[in-house]
Image: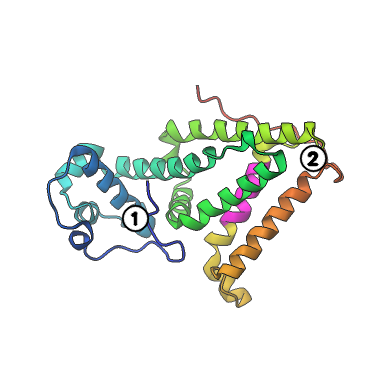
Amino acid sequence: MRNLVHPSRDPAPRRNAKKETGGCGRRDPERTRAAILEAAIIEFATRGLGGARVSRIAERACTNKRMLYHYFGNKEALYLAALEAVYETIRGKELALDVDHMPPDEGMRALVRTLWEQFREHPEFISLLNSENLHRARYLARSERVPALQSPLVEMIAGLLRRGAEAGIFREGIDPTQLYLSIASLAYFYFSNRHTLAISFGIDLLDETALDRRLAHITELVMRYLDAGAEPSATVRPSRPRNTA
């Protein structure tokens, strides 16, 4: 799925779907379903589940509500499908990293950069996360696809940590799940709170120089934490991902 909104702007409805799609011509089923899903992501990210309207989604997708219900059943099922699609886009790019063929430190830097870029390039992901947290993950809890995406990512990070420890670059005993949560939270907080932080500190957080400085800072934090010469923290039992088999 392509990037749906400009990374420096909040998701906003497009005013003329016909003009942007070249008119409401005949679509094949796969294209129609994809168009509905893309329109739904924008609508739910912009207005949340409660404020989203099926009629607007259908209009943006250049189709009708009957076809929307045919493909997705109802509004809540479409909302869950939108959540799953965004998660799959994010995880797909993370898992596409070929870290197995990189030196461990280079692979870790690439992972940090990729996690950062996903939050930067997909503000709709942040909006949907915020919305779903307001619902206490009630809809995401119904998904079998999203939890299954986590285990390969944790395994990839665990492999990097293992190779780094064997090479004497990273210290041992680091929990891959905790590390992922820390990296993701550093990026998520920056972008999800960019408006209030910009006012509080009087800086443009989306300026290219500010973005580069923040990524460099996060990367240094992570790499210093992993450094084999760093003082070990109190031992924490590694988290175990939920069995998704």
Q: Please rate how many residues cluster around mark 1, counting C-alpha atoms within 10 Å: few if below 14, some from 14 to 19, many from 20.
A: many
Picture coordinates of residue 92, whole percent (x, y)? 47, 39
**Residue at 15% over, 57% down:** 23
Q: Earlier in the sequence, mark 1 or mark 2?
A: 1
Give the quadrant of residue 164: top right
Examine the rendered structure and indicate whether residue 204 appears above or below residue 36. below
Q: Which residue is mark 1?
A: 42
Examine the rendered structure and indicate whether residue 198 appears above or below residue 119. below
Secondary element type, mark 2 = loop
The residue type indicated by label 1 comes to: Ile
Q: Which residue is mark 2?
A: 169
Picture coordinates of residue 236, whole percent (x, y)? 77, 36
Q: Is residue 177 left or right of residue 28?
A: right
Q: Is residue 116 left or right of residue 32?
A: right
Give the quadrant of residue 70: top left
Q: Is residue 144 left or right of residue 202?
A: left
Examine the rendered structure and indicate whether residue 178 appears above or below residue 11. above
Residue range of the region highlighted in magenta in the rendering: 179-188
Q: Is residue 153 magenta?
A: no
Picture coordinates of residue 138, whole percent (x, y)? 43, 41
